[in-house]
Amino acid sequence: MSSDGVKSPFIFLCVLVATAAIGQAPAPSYGPSISLEHAKKAAAAAEAEAHKNNWKMAIAVVDPDGTLVYYEKMDNTQLGSAKFSVDKARSAALFKRPTKAFQDRLTSGSAGLPILAVEGAVPVEGGIPLLLEGHIVGAIGVSGDSSEHDSQCAQAGADTLK
């Protein structure tokens, strides 16, 4: 512990998370909350991609604060994916980046391990911020198959707002 009572590993984690953004383009700013119409449109595109590939998915769309705006679970989707889709969407919205960024950080080696200690950061592909007019209006999270397939469906949803 340091003299001010803060544990050194906590300081290390804060510095590590802060320095992870160095050298990256600044994240877009938050905009107004996604409308229900846009949320349904993004989810429909993600669902269409899942149906096309015969994948069973849970799809969640949240606003910039991580509050659920729209949710659906396809028949026979594994039960664990119901909550995980929401977690992925919240992570992408709150941290202004796809959850794949955390996954990549984690798989890059020991420097990525502290990511597991960041509350709300989901280190698995499938969560993508939703942009409208260059601002983050929410995020989509998809879960139910491999992380790559989850991400493919989430990207189909995100692409509808471009």
Image (spheres, rainbow, N blue to C red):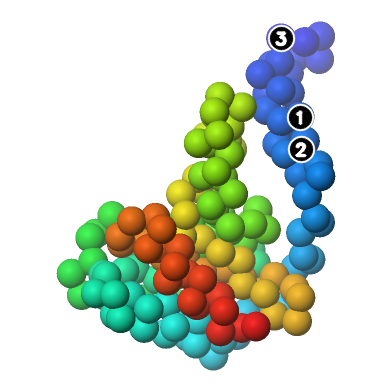
- Cβ–Cβ below 8 Å for labels 1 and 2? yes
Badge 3 element:
loop
User: Is residue 30 shown to the viewer in this render?
Assistant: yes
Up the image or down, 50 lies above or below 89; here it is below
Which mark sits nearer the N-terminus, 2 or 3? 3
Q: Which is in the foreground here, disc 3 or disc 1?
A: 1
* Residue on which disc 3 sits: 1
Vertical placement of residue 51 versus 76, above or below: below
Q: Amino acid at mark 2?
A: Ala
Residue designated by label 1: 15
Residue 19, located in which quarter of the rendered image?
A: top right
Q: Residues within 10 Å of mark 3 (few under 14, many from 20)?
A: few
Query: Label 2 belongs to which residue?
Result: 18
Instruction: Look at the image and tell me in which quarter the C terminus lies.
Output: bottom right
Quarter-of-image position of residue 33: bottom right
- Marks 2/3 in contact by CB < 8 Å: the verdict is no
Q: CA distance from mark 3 to mark 1?
A: 16 Å
Three-letter residue code for mark 1: Val
